[in-house]
Every structure is written in C-alpha cells, then in structure tokens.
C-alpha cells in the first residue's frame, strides 16, 4: 500500500513535466537581409513573454524550443528595423525572417557588437566586434581602410609600432594570433610590410576578436582568434561598389547566379603609388594586389554550398637589384547541412598557402620559402533544448613547411643551389562545447578540446649529445651551438615526435540584475607552430617551424574576471575585465642567433616561459547621433628563460624581462558624430607607453675596434606613442533615388604631426666623433581623400 502511494505520488508529480515536455515545439529558420538575401550573424530572436531568446549562428541559422502557446516574436538587429510578429506554436515551425535596413547607406550590411540584454546573460566574455560601417568611417593612414589597425583601438590590443605588421593581444606575440578568413588560416595579414592589412573591407561580412574564454572549436594559437567571414553575395540583384584613394583603389561586384538561390561575389584591390615614382626619378617599385571571390548556392531548405577564395601578392623592387614577392592563397569549400530543426552542421575543405620569394640580382640568386596546409573541418551545433546547446566537431590539418630554397639566376653566379630540409606535420583535434542555462541568473559554458600533433618524417635530422643542441660555455659565460654527432633519416610516414594535450574551457555569467552581470572564464590552449623571428613584428622573411624533437609546443593557461553593465536601455555599456595568463615553452633566442637560412634552428633557441596580466576597460555609447568608445588597458607582459642547470645563466641572467610588446598604458578614444544625412565626422586619439628596447650603456676598445656593451634586455623604452586622427564623410545626395550613390571621405592622420619613434639607433657622429642617438619616425601628418561609390 505504501509503495503504491509513492508510485501514485511520483506519477502525479512527473505527469505535468512529461506532458509539458511532449508539448514543446521548435521554432527555427534563417534571418537574411531583405535586399541582398545575405544571411545575418548574431541577430536576436527574443520572446518577451518568457524572457528568453536565441541568436543566429555564423550562417544566419537559429533554433529555439518552447512550450506550445502563442508568442510575440521579436527579431532585432542594430541597423535594421525590428520585426515583431505573433506566432502560434503548436507544431515544429520553420520561419525565415527578412530584415530591412533602417536607412540607406553605402554599407550593404551593418554588423555591430551585440549589446542587447541577452548578451548580459551569456557566459561568453573577452570578445569584441567592430561594424564594417564603423571601420570604414575611421580615419586611417593614407585613406586606406584597415581592419587590423581598427581592432588595435580595442582594449587589450596593440601593434608593434607604426608601419609594423601584425597585432598583439593581452601581451602576446603576433604569431600567437589565429587569423581566419572564411575558416582558412592567414599566416601573414599585412600588405607592404605592415602599412595595410590583407582584408578588403568591402568583402567582409562579420568579424570577431576572441581575447579570452575562447570556445573549444578554436585551437592552434595561445593568444587570440580573429575570425572573419566574407559576404556571400547578393542573390537578389546585381550590385557594384568600390572606392578610389590616393594610393589604391578597390572594386567589388556581386549578383545572383540563380535568383534567390545562388550568388557570386568578386572583389579586387590594387595599389598604384609606384606608378608615380618615375616622376621623381626613382626606380623603386612597391605595390600590392588581392582578389576575394565567393560562390554560394542553396540546394534546398536543408543544404547550401559555398566556394570562397582569396589571393594576394606584394611586390617590392629596389632599382632592378632586389625583388621581394610574398602573399597568401586560400580556397575553402563548405557544405551547410541541416539534419533537423535542432542540428546544424558545416563541413569545410580548406587549402592555405603562404609564399615568400626573394631575388637578389647583384648576387644572382633566388630564394623561396613558405608554408602550405590542407584542412578538414566538420562542425555541429546542436540545439538540444532552450537551456542547453552543444557544439562539437573535429579538425585535421596536414602541413608542409619549406624553410627555404636558394637557386642561382645566371650561369656565372657564384651561388650553389641549396635546399633547407622540408618539414611535415599532422595536427588533429576533436572538441565539445556546452552552453548551459542553469537558472534565470546563472549560465555556464564548458567544454574541452583534445589536440594531437605529429611531427612527420623528414630527409635528415641532426642528433646531438644528450639531445642538447645548445650548450653553455662556462668560460665565456654564453650559449653556443652544439656540434651534431650524427644524423637520422626517416620515411615520410614515420613519426619523429608526438604531442597530446587536453585543453579545457570554462566560463560562467551571473546576472546581478536586468542590466548587469559578472563573468569569469578559464581556458587552456596549445600552439604547435612557432614563428622564428627576432624582430618586434613579423616580416615576410620570418619562417614558421613545427614543434618536434627539440622544440616543444606552447601551452597557455588564462583566467579572466569581468563586470558588464548597460545603461539607459542599452544606449551606454561598460565592460571591465581583468586577466592573468602564463605560457610554457615560449621560444627565446641566444645572443647572436642567426635565423636566416639556418638548417639547424634548434641550435639557437631555448624554451622559456611568459606571463601577462592586466585590466581592461571599455565604455561605449551605442546609439544616437554621437557614438563611440573609450578604451583603457593597464597591463604587464614579461618573459623569462632560466638556466637549465645551476651553472647556466639563462637569458638575461634568468630574470624576467619585458617582452617587445609590453605596453603599460594603452588609451584609445574613438568618436563618430552624424550631423545630418550629408555630413558625419569621426576621430581617433591614441596614447601608448613606449615600446621596450635595449640600448647600449657603454663601450670598450679591442684591437682598435670600438665594441658597445648593452644593458639588460628591454630595460629601456622608446618615447611614448600618441597621435590624433580626423575624418569627414560627405554624402552629396543622400536622398537621391538613383541607383548610383557616392561618398567622399576626407581625412588627416596624425593631426599635430607627432614624430613617433619607430626605433632608435646609435651611431658615431663623423663630424664631432661623439656617439649619438637617431630616432626613426615613419609618419608625420598625412592628409588623404578617397571616393566611395555604389550602384
């Protein structure tokens, strides 16, 4: 009797739950731009009655499961008119939405960091987005719109100096950033040695920068992920847009292959400043060009395919005696498949190639190097319930590294053909990530990535006594190359060395009230590739090398804590984050390390450690005629390489020293003001602590030769960096109904002509015989004008 009563009670309790579960249905679909049919990323689908909602993924798909009932569905996206629609949910429904832009502009799509209440609840933190519209309105050097330089205005992001390539995130090196274009890896993100980035803003659909709390689907780098997606193309009607600037121009065309089902996009850029150099009796040449392409086709409601590509080249010639060519080539085929209204998948086959070529006519030889990879990715997003979502997938990458090959260009050349040994590797990963809403106030995400790396067989590998390619000379108190005691040869299928790492990820968000929350995150990441460079920023000559017998993978552990708040119905927002991270096995170089054409790079590098910590503040004004943000970062970035034994001194006597990208203070102010439909104004102001540097602190004479002595590594700094930029945007006929629309952009870079130091060198003054310091400044004040058009 007692057992029957318990059974009846359990049935009475569980029956409503079971009945409720049976009465839940799924609402799913895609959200697109009404004019172009371009899918929109990060659109909010909100159900006010139950204070719930979801967002579209990278392909514009959404899915939400709700109890049966009648709901008011709100679809909102900044820059577009909000859709509010009443919907009766009594079965699984596929519902696609088309959003209309709030105002006509030159930008097909306006993507902005989502600051809706929904994001206050989400555990994702340390992520920044910039709208393409904002980037295009920013004043930049020589009037060329630049994605990379724009993200350096965000907290925690700096560059290595004016005219330098790459960017640094939270005290990390430039090679520790994973840069993706349509999921393909970009190994060099710069044109003209860092003056411009490789990304054509007209072709970009969405970009996100992950600085911490990085989802498990990303791996292979230990500092950040810059994830950029290209537009798909207009499947409704043909359009063209472009721009003409002082040193470069661009043109993009897009249109339907089959109306409302397939589209194409092709865009190109090229610089032409070198065409004017002969007017100044200069024989030098420096230019770049690139090409973005994409084909998209929706086979049916459950299947879409995409084929995208990028090709870019830089050419630099010096008076017919020197020619440098380098660039990226990537191709990606993707298949989106919807298994059900709750399970979305994306399969990608990717080819990526970075090439570097150098021809020196005065010594009559060619030099070529590069890195090539083939990548297979299969990703799934599973909307299991309204409170629980899963992402999981796998990734396999095959690498071929060409460290360098030299060939004579003439029969009379004194150079003999020489080939550095090619290296091969295979990187694999599987991952799972869960986003779990535990209560109305607490949400967590947790997951892990299991990565493996196999250094494959190569033609020849040096063997050293005690497996030690670097020895310490106690008499001279310095590190030296060890002499190999032999070599090993391998078949291509052999595995020289293997590494396996588990990379856990965890983040949580606790909502204090409707407008504020606190968040925390932890992530571990592994990096198996290393950029060999002893300069402060990457150059085309730098060579990537894989982990192996003598080079260990870098391992990151990072924790972050943040406070997030919105004010006045999201008109203002505040983000405050602190972080601390450590990196194991960070490469350091012995004094006098020679990295160029070195077939035994293990003889000049040591494994050290790095750490960085800091505080970031981002205050935004998101709405109104006046918008912008103020970003401030207080941080420290250090590196240490201790001696391996008691007698070894290590690098810098084993003490912590500033990394080249340590910037104690970093302040940036970005503001935009729309006076009316014709005129708008924008400005940037930047201030950064000077870059660390190593200066001589004395000299001595030996056999008639003056030899300088140097202070501890990076113990001095260049002068502080600061500048002010201004831009004015003018739309002559904003209300015109004609298809052709134009826009003028007038800009001034470095308004008050600050001569910021790119570096400081020391030399002897030939007139006085005294030593002197010489500052090199790349840019003073630079005015610019460009014309953008669309039809």
Image (spheres, rainbow, N blue to C red):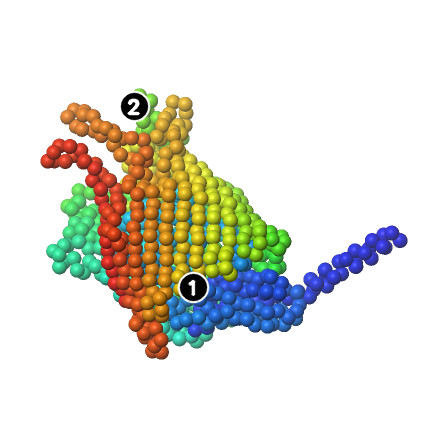
Q: What residue is drawn where x is 32% and y is 39%? A: 692
Say if 700 sits above or below 239 in the image: above
Q: Number of labelled discs?
A: 2
Locate residue 187, reporting x and y percent: 36, 51
Q: Which residue in the protein does label 1 denote?
A: 624
Label 1 crowd bin: few (<14), some (14–19), many (20+), radius 10 Å = few
Q: What residue is drawn where x is 40% and y is 60%? A: 627
> Of discs 1 and 2, which sits in the foreground?
1
- In contact (CB < 8 Å): disc 1 and disc 2: no
Image position of 127 (left or right of 706)? right
Q: The residue tagged with tag 1: helix, strand or loop?
A: loop
Locate residue 514, reporting x and y percent: 57, 56
Locate residue 371, reporting x and y percent: 35, 49
Q: The residue tagged with tag 2: helix, strand or loop?
A: loop
Instruction: Identify which residue, 337 or 227, lies in the foreground.
Output: 227
Extreme-bottom residue of the structure: 737
Residue 29, picture quadrant: bottom right
Q: What residue is drawn where x is 46% and y is 41%? A: 581
Instruction: Identify which residue, 700 or 780, lies in the foreground.
Output: 780
Locate residue 337, reporting x and y percent: 52, 64
> What label sits on residue 476 in the rendered view?
2
Measure the C-alpha gap from mark 1 to mark 2.
66 Å
């Amino acid at each position: 009797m007692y057992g029957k009563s318990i059974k009846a009670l359990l049935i009475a309790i569980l029956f409503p739950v079971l009945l409720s579960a049976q009465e839940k249905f799924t609402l799913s679909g895609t959200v697109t731009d009404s004019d172009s049919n371009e899918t929109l990323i990060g659109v909010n689908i909100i159900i006010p009655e139950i204070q719930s909602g979801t967002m579209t993924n990278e392909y514009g798909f959404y899915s939400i499961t709700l109890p049966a009932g009648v709901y008011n569905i709100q679809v909102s996206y900044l820059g577009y008119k909000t859709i509010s629609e009443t919907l009766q949910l009594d079965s699984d429904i596929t519902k696609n939405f088309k959003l209309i832009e709030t105002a006509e502009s030159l930008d097909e799509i306006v993507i902005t960091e989502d600051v809706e209440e929904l994001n206050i609840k989400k555990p994702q933190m340390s992520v920044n987005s910039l709208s393409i519209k904002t980037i295009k309105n920013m004043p930049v050097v020589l009037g060329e719109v630049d994605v990379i330089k724009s993200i350096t205005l965000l907290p925690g992001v700096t560059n290595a100096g004016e005219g330098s390539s790459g960017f640094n995130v939270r005290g990390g090196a430039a090679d520790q950033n994973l840069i993706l274009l349509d999921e393909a890896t970009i190994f060099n993100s710069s044109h003209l040695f860092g003056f411009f980035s490789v990304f054509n803003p007209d072709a970009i659909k969405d970009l996100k920068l992950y600085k911490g709390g990085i989802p498990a689907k990303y791996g292979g780098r230990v500092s950040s992920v810059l994830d950029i997606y290209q537009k798909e193309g207009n499947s409704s009607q043909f359009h063209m847009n472009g721009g003409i600037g002082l040193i470069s121009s661009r043109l993009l065309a897009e249109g339907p292959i089959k109306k409302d089902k397939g589209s194409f996009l092709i865009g190109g850029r090229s610089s032409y400043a070198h065409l004017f150099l002969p007017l100044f009796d200069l024989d030098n040449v420096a230019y770049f060009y690139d090409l973005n392409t994409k084909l998209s086709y929706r086979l049916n409601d459950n299947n879409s395919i995409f084929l995208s590509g990028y090709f870019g080249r830089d050419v630099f010639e010096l008076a017919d005696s020197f020619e440098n060519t380098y660039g990226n080539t990537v191709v990606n085929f993707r298949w989106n498949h919807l298994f059900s209204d709750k399970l979305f998948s994306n399969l990608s086959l990717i080819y990526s190639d970075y090439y570097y070529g150098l021809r020196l006519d005065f010594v009559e030889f060619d030099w070529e190097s590069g890195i090539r990879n083939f990548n297979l990715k299969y990703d799934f997003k599973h909307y299991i319930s309204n409170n629980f979502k899963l992402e999981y997938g796998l990734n396999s990458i095959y690498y071929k590294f060409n460290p360098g090959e030299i060939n004579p260009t003439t029969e009379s050349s004194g150079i003999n053909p020489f080939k550095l040994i090619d290296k091969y590797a295979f990187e694999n990963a599987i991952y799972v990530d869960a986003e779990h809403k535990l209560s109305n106030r607490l949400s967590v995400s947790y997951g892990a990535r299991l990565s493996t790396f196999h250094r494959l067989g190569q033609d020849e590998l040096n063997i050293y006594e005690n497996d030690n390619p670097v020895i310490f000379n106690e008499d001279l108190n310095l590190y030296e190359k060890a002499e190999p005691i032999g070599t090993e040869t391998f078949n291509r299928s052999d595995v020289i060395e293997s590494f396996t790492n588990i990379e856990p990820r965890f983040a949580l968000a606790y909502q204090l009230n409707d407008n504020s929350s606190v968040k925390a995150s932890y992530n571990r990441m592994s990096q198996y590739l290393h950029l060999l460079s002893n300069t402060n920023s990457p150059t085309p000559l730098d060579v990537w090398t894989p982990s192996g017998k003598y080079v260990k993978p870098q391992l990151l552990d990072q924790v972050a804590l943040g406070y997030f708040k919105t004010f006045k119905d999201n008109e203002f927002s505040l983000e405050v984050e602190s972080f601390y991270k450590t990196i194991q096995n960070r490469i350091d170089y012995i004094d006098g390390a020679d990295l160029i054409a070195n077939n035994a790079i293990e003889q000049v590098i040591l494994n050290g450690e790095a750490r960085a910590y800091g505080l970031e503040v981002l205050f935004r004004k998101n709405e109104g005629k006046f918008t912008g943000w103020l970003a401030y970062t207080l941080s420290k970035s250090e590196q240490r390489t201790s001696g391996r034994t008691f007698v070894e001194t290590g690098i810098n006597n084993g003490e912590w020293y500033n990394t080249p990208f340590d910037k104690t203070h970093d302040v940036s102010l970005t503001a935009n003001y729309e006076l009316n439909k014709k005129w708008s104004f924008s400005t940037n102001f930047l201030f950064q602590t000077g870059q660390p540097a190593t200066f001589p602190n004395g000299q001595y004479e030996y056999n008639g030769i003056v030899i300088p002595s140097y202070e501890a590594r990076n113990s001095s700094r260049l002068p502080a960096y600061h500048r002010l930029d201004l831009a004015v945007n003018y739309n002559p006929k904003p209300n015109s109904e004609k298809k052709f629309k134009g826009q003028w952009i007038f800009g001034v870079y470095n308004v008050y002509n600050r001569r910021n130091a790119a570096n400081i060198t020391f030399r002897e003054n030939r007139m006085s015989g005294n030593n002197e310091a010489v500052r090199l400044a790349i840019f003073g004040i630079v005015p610019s004008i460009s014309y953008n058009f669309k039809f």
